[in-house]
Structures are given as C-alpha cells and as structure tokens.
Image (spheres, rainbow, N blue to C red):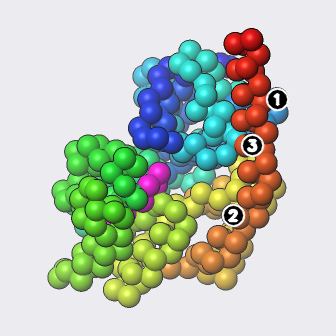
Amino acid sequence: MSFKILSKKQLSENVFQMDVMAPLVARSRKAGQFVIVSVDQDAGERIPLTIAAADAENGSIRLIFQRVGKATTQMADLAEGESLGYVAGPLGQPTHIKKFGTVVCVGGGIGNAPLLPIATALKEAGNTIISIIGARTKELLILEDEFRAISDELIVVSDDGSCGRKALVTEPLKEICSRDPKPDCAIAIGPAVMMKFCCDTTKEFNVPTQVSLNTIMVDGTGMCGGCRVEVGGQTKFVCVDGPEFDGHQVNFDQMMRRMSAYKELEQKALEQYQKHQCKIGLDQTA
C-alpha cells in the first residue's frame, strides 16, 4: 500500500502538516487515537503521531508533527507526491466522548494538534468548550483559527506576550477552575512539564483531568515496553492502555526521566543525517 503525501503545509518554523493516503485508518479512526509512522518501509525509526483529522471519503488522514530528531526531520524533507514507508493504526484507546457539561481544553505548543480533534468531538457531543492554547511565541502558535471555530470561549497565551496574554496556560486555567460553577472536567495536552502543572492546578479544585501522553514507542502494541508509565502506582503502557490517562494519577517525574533516556543517541542520529544530506547537496552541485 502506498501512503502518498497528498498535501504538505508548514505551520511554523518546525511544525508541518501532511495529508496522507491511509484509507483503512481514515475509515476506522476515532478522536484521541494515533498511528505509528516510518519514513522507510523496511528500516528506520518508528514514531507515534496523533491523527489530527481524517477524511473517510477520500481515504486520507492529517498528521501534524514537529521537526525535532532524525525521523521527523526526514519527514519534513519529504515533498508532496512522495510517500511514507508505512502508517500503522489506528492505535490506542479513543477518547471517551460524551456530554460532560463544560470542558476546559488546554493545549501547549504541538499539543494543540492532538487536542483539536478531541475538542471538536466534545463540542459535537453538546459540551461547552473553553479552549486555552499557548506557545512560547506568536510564530509557534498553531491552529488558532480552528480552535476559535469550535470553542465557546478561547484564551490565547504566549510566554513572551507576542500573542494573546503574556502568561503560561496554567494562569487562565486556574481562573476558570475558580469560577462558580467550576468546569466539569478538563483535558490537557502538551509538553510533559506543562501537563504536570496543569494537573496540579486542576487537582486543587477537584476538576477531573485527562492527559494524552506521547512517550517513546517502538511497536505500538505493548510488546516492547518502551512506553510504560506509572499511573496510580501501577505500570501502564501508553500505546495500548492510553494514550489518555487520569492526569492526577500519572507519575510525570518518572515519565520525564524515561523520555530523556535516548537524547544523546537521538542527537547523534540527527547530526549524522544532516551531514549525509549536506554531502548529497554538495555532490549534486559539484
């Protein structure tokens, strides 16, 4: 099967959006689920990416990813018309969608991408959606228009004040949790440290909070154990038990330590790839 790239768009300096042919995934995917993607068919790193949207009619799914390591840099280098090696999914447990009442949806940076389909599904289920989306700077904020379209209230924040309020997402989150009545539940997706402090904030007000975890994965079927996390004192596997969990039960400190285990190897792999690409470029101009 060919996983052809139908369209490609750069959302910010290091964030890209791709619509990819994957008919079976597009027909069966639900909000909150993800795919395992590889640029090469027979080798290469396998990375989990949330399905940001899907079009069952034309058989495509939308992937939004951040250029960080070798695999995502390889993806960013692909052009429309080229293909991914494979796309496996949909994987993981879908989001529990029902009418809760008022739901606060908090997204940070690239976390806005997996949050959008969940917020959209919750809105379609009849919930009042309060969205808080943030980024370090205006240039790094993604999907603002899309969140505005499905939110009853939208709050934009940035670390430097270049867009919206100059604040971290936890500041307006605390204000909303302080309202009477308080929100019925919350969902937070973004960097691990951001989700940790969002959960600390909502726990103070006893607002149930879900988080979607993006840990190291290899097979996506629970076999390798690379994605294991501690939730409520028990070991869980993000790929099959998640990716969503009760944020008040997640051991974020342990998770963050595990996620940094391969940083040196990841950096070396990226440097080797960049050197190889540079050599190819020089050879072509020689």
Mark nearer the viewer, 2 or 1: 2
Q: Residue at 36% of width from left, 74% of height from top?
A: 170
Q: Is residue 101 visible?
A: no
Query: Which residue range is magenta in the image?
Result: 104-111
Camera-side residue: 60 or 284?
284
Ranked by sequence position, the earlier of labels 3 and 1 is 1
Ranked by sequence position, the earlier of labels 2 and 3 is 2
- Residue 282 is covered by the magenta coloring: no
Cα distance between the residues tagged 2 and 1: 25 Å
Q: Residue at 71% of width from left, 64% of height from top?
A: 260
- Identify the main secondary structure in magenta: strand
Q: Residue at 24% of width from left, 78% of height from top?
A: 175
Q: Which residue is mark 3?
A: 271
Instruction: Identify the secondary structure beneath mark 1.
Output: loop
Quick check: 254 left or right of 25?
right
Estimate the x, y position of residue 106 in percent, counting from the top left: 37, 63
Cα distance between the residues tagged 3 and 1: 22 Å
Q: Residue at 75% of width from left, 51% of height from top?
A: 266
Estimate the x, y position of residue 125 in percent, counting from the top left: 29, 53
Instruction: Identify the secondary structure beneath mark 2.
Output: helix
Q: Which residue is mark 2?
A: 259
Q: Give the amino acid type for the residue marked by disc 2 in the picture.
A: Met
Quadrant housing the C terminus: top right
Estimate the x, y position of residue 16 in percent, counting from the top left: 49, 36
Residue 25 lies in quadrant: top right
Ranked by sequence position, the earlier of labels 2 and 1 is 1
